[in-house]
Amino acid sequence: MVTRWLTLCKVVRRVLQVFFSFNLALFSKMARQRKGKHSFDSSRDHVDRTKFPRRRVKESSFKPILVLAAVFGLPLFLFGAYKLWNYKLSTRLFMPLDAPLVINKSEMEMSRFWGTYRSNLYFGLRTRSPKSLMTGLMWFPQLSPDGQVTIRHTCEQSDGLPKYGWLKHDGTNFASQQIVDKDFELNTDFVKRLGGDHGGDWTARISGKRTGNPRQMVSLLFYVTYEGEAQLQPVVHKNTLTALRGYTPELGSFKLYFPRPSKVLLSSFLITHTPHVHSVKEIVMQNMRGEKMKDGKNMQLLALAGHVAKRDQNGRELPVNLFVQQWILELPFDVEFVFESESSSTREKSLIGAAFTNLRDKYSAEFDKKFEEKFSLKAKGFNDDEVKFAQAGLSNMIGGIGYFYGSSKVISRFFKEPKDYWESALYTAVPSRPFFPRGFLWDEGFHQLLISQWDSDISKDIIGHWLDLINIEGWIPREQILGDEARTKVPSDFVVQHNENANPPTLILPIKSMVDKGVLDEEYLRKIFPRLKAWFNWFNTTQLGNQPSTYRWHGRDAKTDRELNPKTLTSGLDDYPRASHPSDDERHVDLRCWMAFAAGLMADIAEAVGEKSDAGLYKSTSQYLSDNRLLDEYHWSSKAETYSDFGNHTKFVKLVQRVMYPNQPGSPKKTVRVVTSKQGPSLRYVNAVGYVSLFPFLLQILDPTSPKLEKVLTQLRDPEKLWGKYGIRSLSKSDPVYKKHNTEHDAPYWRGAIWININFLAVRALNHYASIPGPYQGTAKAIYTDLRQNLIKNMFREYERSGFIWEQYDDGTGHGKGSHPFTGWSSLVVLMMSEHF
């Protein structure tokens, strides 16, 4: 549809050009005629000219008006129509798809209303409502070796914590986390008890124990703030914020109170105004002061300042919206924060002390039981430590689920400046709490493969939220940066999303998995089908290649001279080598395979919901795109004996330093890419052996009897190409850009490192080809056994050594690299352990 509209705009533009050219010629001719007529009339006397009939005079004066109206009116009308058409096209960027929403907010599952949905914090709670009451935890040691106060709040790799992460998290009622700091260890336990109309009661317990300096004291700060309408009344007694009584539209009336723990050295509080949720830590630091201990030790402690009024530029007092309670505690300690909803009528006693412990232990035992039922790791022979590792992998993915609300910054060819997408909610897992605490479309499909195995209702909820972000064009912004708090973690270059840029449609992976297992009912499939249909059509129109049945990722920079190989961020594989010189002639084999896989799923769903004509269309599309003969014609390189991208390419490129201003002494240098061969780039296969070349195998497009499958398996097992002791590397060791920087500052990313999401697809594909008859069934089975074992063994060893699951793993040493903890798709190790594919 969009393509037809753009074509129509071009036609209208051409018509306008023709009209303006014609009118200019006509106007010039009229001017010449009028000039000639005036010369002729002037040769007559006045009397002769007045003898013309009156009617004749009127007729001659009226014709020029009609001509002028035609000359100027029609082009103006067409120009106005053209501008109106362009305006209608431009507004499609931020216009929601005209289809029923998947997520009905009035039918929200209240058991998941409250949760640890501030996943960018070490510990923070909020509701799944746009203007939520929010809580958070901060802490710092009072005795610091370097004398600097370092407050922990948001998850930061720069904090250098030896270990932190969820040990158990069921996604609904219970969560337990371990945080190892320098001299002590914290445990955060969260327990919910359902009841009433607003999500029930909950209690958070923070426990501390000493691991280092025996004199160490910990300052613990728990705060409450909100973004929307709220009525909060603090209760202060003896320099302690003991409770908050309040009301909000989504919570009704409630009470949040702070029982006084033992071993308190000092208590203080802060009641003030914060301009933003993400400014809380800054406000706390601005309102700290020194206070002496009262036990005669003459020690200065950092405490909060109490009531602090804030005023705007005009001197008006700003409303109070931040409440912080601080305790300075000796180790060990237990501190509880208790929320009770007044709509709960079944509460027998508060969820504190023994009542909390008993319910936590009950939920913990239920988690263990459900985990074994879902994944059967003990039955497969894994020991207790390996099971705990797998539980942590799942729990950190579940504990990374966040709730976000806001509008993305988007742009299209019709705008020079970014526009706001419509305001929307997103319930989603995140790849990494410290480094990527927001939604990524490419990652989320992998996340839901694991989450759907644990709780399909959570997955249906998350997938529905993502599909509700589709605009009328069928596009979903690939990176969701919703709200000011989320934007504080994102470089400005990555904030704006372009509506012609895609991301792999990985949501089809968990949807396909759940369809095959029969856990998606017809009602849900009917809700998601029109949205999946619009999404598929968007891919099938905006990402087409120049040849039939070929596709290319848009968004590569054809003008840059700073990158060794211009990135393809839209593919999800960032700096993986594609054609060296981006052009419209590119053919990307991975995108073709995604489309073939998606067409097959669309046919299955259309059949399930009774859309027979659509089912036939998608089935024929799937067969066409999965045709191995056509696949080979466009993507098989007989020279490299591999599947490959095609485009304007040369492997003879390198980064060099050039003087920016040769005629100026001391001129700075810049790093640029140069072509080192006289021939330069030409249209050819790229011949990069790695993750992209594996996609016909990874997505199981290859026929099990195809000789090409044997070639793929041989490359997979070759230690000089892709095989390693710790997993399949992303790029062959023999490739010219293996482990090469892409710019002066951009270290290699998808150029040799081991990534768990693609290794999972490889293990899954090997399991597939090992389970169906074919000449390479035995080979696939042998590689499956070795690869699965290598991945599990190395990831467990690294978790034990470092305390974390990592973004990627070094293909030479097996050590974790990049962001950590990275418990997005790296947690798919749990499915490899359980052999659920």
Image (cartoon, helix red, strand yellow):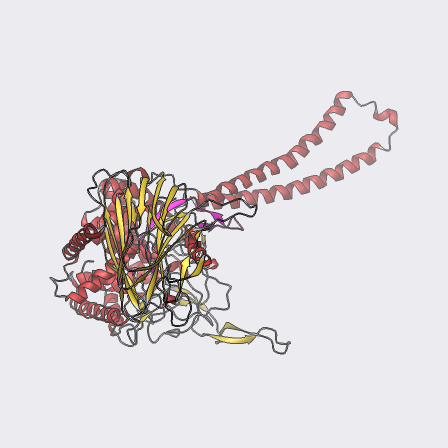
Q: Residue 148 location in percent, x, y?
A: 42, 68
Q: Choose between 671 and 139: the one closer to the eye.
A: 139
Q: Residue 87 location in percent, x, y?
A: 52, 42
Q: Choose between 543 and 740: the one closer to the eye.
A: 740
Quarter of the N terminus within the rendering = top left
- Secondary structure that dominates the magenta span: loop
In the picture shown, does residue 343 fall above or below 469? above
Q: Residue furthest front?
A: 296
Q: Choose between 294 and 425: the one closer to the eye.
A: 294
Identified at 34% across, 63% down, the residue is 295
Q: Choose between 472 and 255: the one closer to the eye.
A: 255
What is the magenta range?
408-435
Identified at 17% across, 68% down, the residue is 785
Question: Is residue 623 visible to us here?
Answer: no
Give left or right: position of 185 versus 55: left
* Residue 423 on the magenta segment: yes
Quarter of the C terminus within the rendering = bottom left
Give left or right: position of 753 versus 42: left
Count the labels in the image. Answer: 0
In the picture shown, does residue 654 fall above or below 81? below
Q: Residue 243 location in percent, x, y?
A: 33, 47
